């Protein structure tokens, strides 16, 4: 498993939430995907609260600075979120494309 810094974890979760909300329909499969990602990344409520002020641009910059293994894993998580409800919305892909 890829290990991330706390800041990187929060950025990944933030982007996953944006993808989840991009089509304005939150599917149960997306909620489960997010829960699984929180568990996989070992993100706690305290950690979420500590980094709640990170904005989208900051998260993009942090993801761009990741090494290739970390970035590839994160992008795969983002793509997994986009397709987990059975339909990849163009608005979801535009978020992901902006990170690559």
Image (cartoon, grey):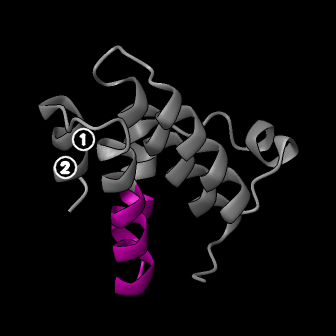
User: Label 1 near label 2: C-beta < 8 Å?
Assistant: yes
* Residue name at image x 62 percent, y 73 percent: 4
Q: Secondary structure at mark 2?
A: loop
Rendered image quadrant of residue 52: top right
On the image, the x and y values in percent for residue 33 come to 54, 45
* Residue name at image x 42 percent, y 65 percent: 74
Where is mark 1, residue-wise?
95
Where is mark 2, residue-wise?
98
Magenta stretch, main secondary structure, is: helix
* Residue name at image x 64 percent, y 80 percent: 3
Does the magenta segment cover residue 49? no
Q: Residues within 10 Å of mark 1 (few under 14, many from 20)?
A: some
* Quarter that holds the N terminus: bottom right
Residue 85: image tag:
none
* Residue name at image x 45 percent, y 78 percent: 70
On the image, the x and y values in percent for residue 59 come to 45, 50
What residue range appears in magenta?
A: 61-77
What's the distance in space between the residues labelled 2 and 1, CA to CA?
5 Å
On the image, the x and y values in percent for residue 82 come to 31, 43
* Quarter that holds the C terminus: bottom left
The answer to whether residue 88 is left or right of residue 24 is left
């Amino acid at each position: 498993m890829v290990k991330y810094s706390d800041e990187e974890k929060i950025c990944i979760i933030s982007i996953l939430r944006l993808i989840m909300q991009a089509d304005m329909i939150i599917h149960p499969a997306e909620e489960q995907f997010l829960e699984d990602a929180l568990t996989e990344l070992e993100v706690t409520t305290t950690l979420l609260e500590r980094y709640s002020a990170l904005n989208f641009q900051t998260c993009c910059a942090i993801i761009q600075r990741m090494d290739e293994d970390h970035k590839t894993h994160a992008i795969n998580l983002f793509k997994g979120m986009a397709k987990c409800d059975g339909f990849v919305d163009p608005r979801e892909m535009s978020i992901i494309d902006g990170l690559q």
